Image (cartoon, grey):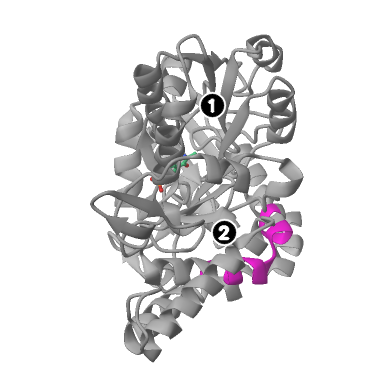
Amino acid sequence: MAHQTQAKTFEVERIRKDFPILNREVNGYPLVYFDNAATSQTPQQVIDAIADYYSNYNANIHRGVHSLSQEATDKYEQARIKIQQHFNAGKAHEIIFTSGTTHGINLVASGFSGFLKEGDEVIVSAMEHHSNIVPWQMLCERTGAKLKVIPMDQKGELIYAEFEKLLSAKARLVFVNHVSNALGTVNPIKDIIQKSHAVGAAVLVDGAQAAPHIKADVQDLDVDFYVVSAHKMCGPTGVGILYGKEEWLEKLPPYQGGGEMIATVSFEGTTYAGLPHKFEAGTPNICGGIAFGAALDYMNGLGFDEIAAYEHELLEYATRKLKEIEGMKIYGEAAEKTAVISFNIEGLHPYDIGTLLDKMGIAVRTGHHCAQPVMDFFKIPGTVRASFSFYNTFEEIGRFVEGVKKAKMMLQ
Ligand SMILES: *Cc1c(COP(=O)(O)O)cnc(C)c1O
């Protein structure tokens, strides 16, 4: 098969050896892990970084005079710089450590409360994750601003002409994901950012689903805020970052009060610490931040262009094979998409397909994927979603397609 020649240059078999979990069996079969859009697996290099932290220099940061504390602080701040370089942020203090994408979005949504008034408009896209809808609805409730929605079409692409109609002097904020987790659509965010800025609106991009596949350059994009989670890109859960332009981060009020985020405290009043500490109250996920840095080292070692090219081959192969199955309906056929396939088979419930696949050792997600508006648009309760990573193989896709066929036979 032609794809194997190119796949070989990617050395997927060598890469798989870095992931201990890929050796395990599930229900008597070797695991096929196709739920990467929910969380990715963790390479030994990242597991080692976590073990090294707890084995050798576990200490609280920015506080102690002792050596361990200084070592932990140095490693944590080095991780911040790695992340800064990865996303090409101009300054290290524009990278705020968070507990993940959801936290980053809430931080910005909460911070904007004081900047919006009744009659202002905030624009979201029709294909957002719930974590990029609910905080903005809450913001609108607090401020009286109106939520407007960029619609999408049957292919799962945003309708650009409608977006342009929504842009007016009333538009203050635009929120859009870089890649849809439910459909895999890659949105033209650079253009969206330019057009939004032209009417004076700030833009937050949810990069959670893009970051594992596409290396975003926040300066080139000229994005105001960009949020990601480490656990979707080979890092641990419970850590992520918010990139914010310095001028915005200076303007926004702190999100939480506590230790680390202050300069001076008295009962008469408190002055806040400078960036990034203003937004990092309390003891952070120190080990998680360091491990996030290790995850970026690992992925950059493989190369994001190489990762994207290989995953694209997996996507094309799986799409072609699935389409051979009668009654197959794939949701999300955007011209540009990441390796996510959401589908249903006529007459069958996604949950039943997912359950039978699990019996064969194949992990997929079923349900609304935290994107109910997308499901409502297609008038379905949910889909089966298979999402691929660079450590997946064509053989695994073969097993998956056979599994879907078998499930179909059993259920019909
Ligand atoms: C996973 C995901 C989120 C939420 O990330 P958390 O790590 O759960 O905070 C938000 N948006 C998109 C597009 C996602 O894929």
Q: Quadrant of residue 333?
A: top right
The answer to whether residue 79 is seen in the rendering is yes
Amino acid type, label 2: His
What predominant SS class does the magenta segment belong to? Answer: helix
Is residue 206 found inside the magenta-colored segment of the image?
no
Which element is circle 1 on? strand
Residue in the image at 30% along x and 57% along y:
265
Which label lies toward us, 2 or 1? 2
The answer to whether residue 384 is seen in the rendering is no
Residue 53: image location, x then y, percent: 38, 81
Q: As rendered, which of 374 and 200 lies closer to the eye?
A: 200
Instruction: Classify the position of the N terminus by image quarter.
Output: bottom right
Amino acid type, label 1: Tyr
Report the residue marked by disc 2: 93
**Label for residue 68?**
none
Q: Viewed as shown, does residue 324 lie left or right of 268?
A: right
